[in-house]
Amino acid sequence: MRSYAAVDLGASSGRVMVGRVGPDTLELTEAHRFPNRPVRVPEGLRWDVLALYAGVLDGLRAAGGLAGGRLDSVGIDSWAVDYGLLDTRGALMGNPAHYRDTRTEGVAEKVWATVPAAELYTATGLQYAPFNTLYQMTADREAGRLALAERLLLIPDLLTYWLTGEQGTELTNASTTQLVDPRTRTWAHGLAARLGIDLGLFAPLRQPGDPAGTLRPEVLAETGLTGPVPVTAVGSHDTASAVAAVPATGERFAYICTGTWSLAGLELDAPVLTEESRAANFTNELGLDGTVRYLRNIMGLWLLQECVREWGDPDLGTLLQAAAEAPALRSVVDAQDVAFLAPGRMPERIAEACRASGQPVPGTPAEITRCVLDSLALAHRRAIEDAQRLADRPVDVVHVVGGGTRNALLCRLTADACGLPVVAGPTEAAALGNVLVQARAHGAVGDRADLRRLVAGTQPLARYEPRGDAGRWREAAARLAAR
């Protein structure tokens, strides 16, 4: 069996995992986990990318220890949209801005004044989010920062550059910039020119599975690895890697990638670029092998994470048990509302939203937690129903992958809300997808269906059948829609 290191970076933590892959074997071992703590400085909210890189190096050293000092490949995936700017010497110009920073407030309206929102969607198929890379780049252009930059690298491409000295832009992550045409799977040159965006700032596009260089001698010395160690482009948007590891046995499935965000949708062969799709705020991001990740962004477990932080980090198991016993669907909020995007005061903001909509106000941590989880299940239901209708693609099962699979209450409520069976797992879907794309690039596994069969046959999965009164969920959805 071969050993592959998956660097998987999330919005709150990073991890380096070692995957061992054989014809009927897929094993994943955590080598190192480290926090990802954004820093608020006078100019705004920033990623501590140097600490992340140090965590990656520590993780590769630990991965080498697990693999006997020899890795067959390394791949990096992370969250989307954010980037670092390099100067003419290839040096980072400053810590990358965090997508929750306020610098893009009001920027979308300026962009739409040149390219209306409907036209922008037709060109790129990307949903509206205030932090899209296009809006971040527009803010940087207006502030004069882009004029000082020689290169723009998305977060996983930046870390790959530091590891290898080679620059590239991986396609699945590039598709989240709102500067890629999902039909041609390349840059939308005409759109960028109209908006004054220089696409020359981006390094050449890479496909998942393409070679991305080898670890520099200095990196080998620091990590103790035996070279050469190739770095392989994977689905560097973590959702692309996670979808690659969905253990589906057929085509009639929906997926929900759960964690800080919930990404709920379908895997399609072509984008859906209708006005109805735009109005429903669905996005067309690119996946493996010419596929499209047709999905909706939902605020996700961020809502609960922020509440737990405000409450002083109580025991989550005890909190979820109490929430399971709280009254169901008593109060619900819109889990897609951008009002919940910023950190701080989350329990109070949820209570205020319930009060404003005339619902009972949850007061205890258990009641607020139940409100959050019921609301997320309702958002999952709406996204899956809308995706089927807009793409004309019925589904028989919902696959939940990612960190939310540990939350059995959320998985059960999602099955109840959707009226469909939910298969939960794998938890480390992004890391597994990362490993499998590397393994495929190096000839260890076959096509995308083979990847999924390997996941389904080796990883622990849990199944939740829908139960209870479907009418209660319809009533709650109608109550929310009437706000």
Image (tube, rainbow, N blue to C red):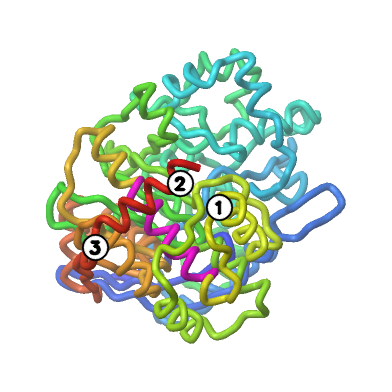
User: Residue 27, how many percent across, how many down?
Assistant: 29, 75
The amino acid on which the numbered mark 1 sits, given as a three-letter code, is Gly
Residue in view at x 26 percent, y 55 percent: 471
SS at mark 3 in the image: loop
- Crowding at dot 2, Cα within 10 Å, few <14 / some 14-19 / many 20+, comes out as many
Q: Alpha carbon of mark 1 to alpha carbon of mark 2: how far?
A: 26 Å
> Which residue is under mark 3?
469
Residue in view at x 48 percent, y 16 percent: 119
Picture quarter containing residue 282?
A: top left
> Which residue is under mark 1?
358
Q: Alpha carbon of mark 2 to alpha carbon of mark 3: how far?
A: 27 Å
Q: Is residue 8 visible?
A: no
Q: Main secondary structure of the magenta part?
A: helix
The amino acid on which the numbered mark 3 sits, given as a three-letter code, is Asp
Picture quarter containing residue 422?
A: bottom left
Farthest residue in the right direction?
A: 42
Instruction: Magenta stretch: give its range.
Output: 368-382
Disc on the earlier residue, 1 or 2: 2
Name the disc covering residue 297, or none: 2
User: Residue 383, how many percent across, how many down?
Assistant: 35, 45
SS at mark 1 in the image: loop
**Along the line of sight, the residue nearer the viewer: 348 or 182:** 348
The amino acid on which the numbered mark 2 sits, given as a three-letter code, is Asn
The answer to whether residue 191 is above or below residue 400 is above
Disc on the earlier residue, 3 or 1: 1
Say if the magenta span includes residue 138.
no
